[in-house]
Image (spheres, helix red, strand yellow):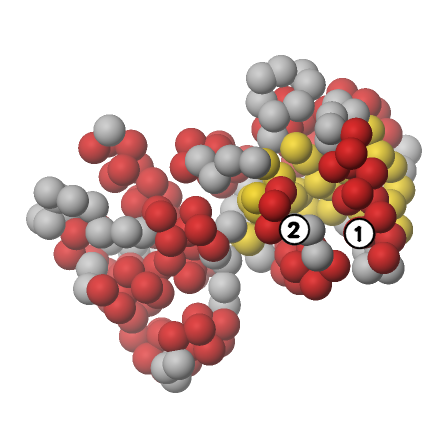
Amino acid sequence: MRVALAEDGALFREGLVMLLQAAGHDVVGCTEDGDTLVELLRSQPADVAILDIRMPPEPDGGLVTAERLRAAHPEMGLLFLSHYAESHYLMRILQIGTDAIGYRLKEKVGSVDVLTDTLARIGDGEIVIEPVLAKRLVERPRGDRKSAIGALSERELDVLRLMAEGRSNNGIAGQLFVTAKAVEKHIAGIFGKLGLQPDASEQHRRVLAVLTYLRSQRDED
């Protein structure tokens, strides 16, 4: 896979390049800021761009850079890395795109296996969200049992959490030790309780389900 990256921390940047090369990826470019990455990718094609969220241009240069890259290279995957698992970052990221995009913690991509799995899933067009953030997003809201999210069962919340990680139905079934048919039933229940109509694609409704929860958290704040 051809990968370009922008990271202003020299040590992490060089370590990430070593990991990518060890995994057999072709690092087509490595920059310290978003503007340089945009310029680089005008002449160097890449399958995925890896961006630090907090980098020049400040304060959240990775997000601004990604918006420019998605407009110029809509087929290119985007992987955001950060020291922080923040729901407001996730909302911005899902506004940039709902396919071939990921958000992982820097401390979690320090192995060849994890990094390779993340890039492969993004390359396949999936959404990949840091599991700790996905779990936090779908914890049952306190004091709001009558909301749409509050109406979900514990099992449906489990399924929604794994959906938020970008996992497929089979992947969810494997994590929960249930059949894929049972997962389909739970997802249908989630879509119904959240009022997500079948006139959109399932992938779109999956993203909308996660966004519904994000917005419910924001409204409570």
Q: Nearer the viewer, residue 204 or 52?
A: 52
Amino acid type of the residue that numbered disc 1 sits on in the rendered structure: Leu
**Residue 134 higher or lower than 67, as above or below:** below
Determine the residue positioned at 82% across, 59% down.
23
Q: Which residue is mark 1?
A: 19
Q: Quadrant of the C terminus?
A: top left
Q: Is residue 201 visible?
A: no
**Foreground of the two, 65 or 32:** 32
Residue at (66% x, 23% y) in the render? 55
Q: Residues within 10 Å of mark 1 (few under 14, many from 20)?
A: some
Left of 150 or right of it: where is 3? right
Whether residues under marks 1 and 2 lie with C-beta atoms below 8 angstroms apart, the answer is yes
Residue at left 50%, top 64%? Answer: 167
* Residue at the top extreme of this rendering: 58
Q: Earlier in the sequence, mark 1 or mark 2?
A: 1
Residue 189 in the figure: left or right of residue 165: left
Q: Does residue 196 appear anywhere in the picture?
A: yes
Q: Secondary structure at mark 2?
A: loop
User: Please, what secondary structure does the residue beneath circle 1 have?
Assistant: helix
Quarter of the image where one finds residue 67: top right
Quarter holding the N terminus is bottom right
Q: Residue at x 39, y 81 (%)?
A: 177
Per the model, the C-alpha gap separating discs 1 and 2 is 9 Å
* Residue 192 position in % (x across, y down): 23, 61
Q: Give the residue number, with chain letter if any, for mark 2.
A: 109
Q: Nearer the viewer, residue 153 or 46?
A: 153
Relative depth, front residue between 213 and 118: 118
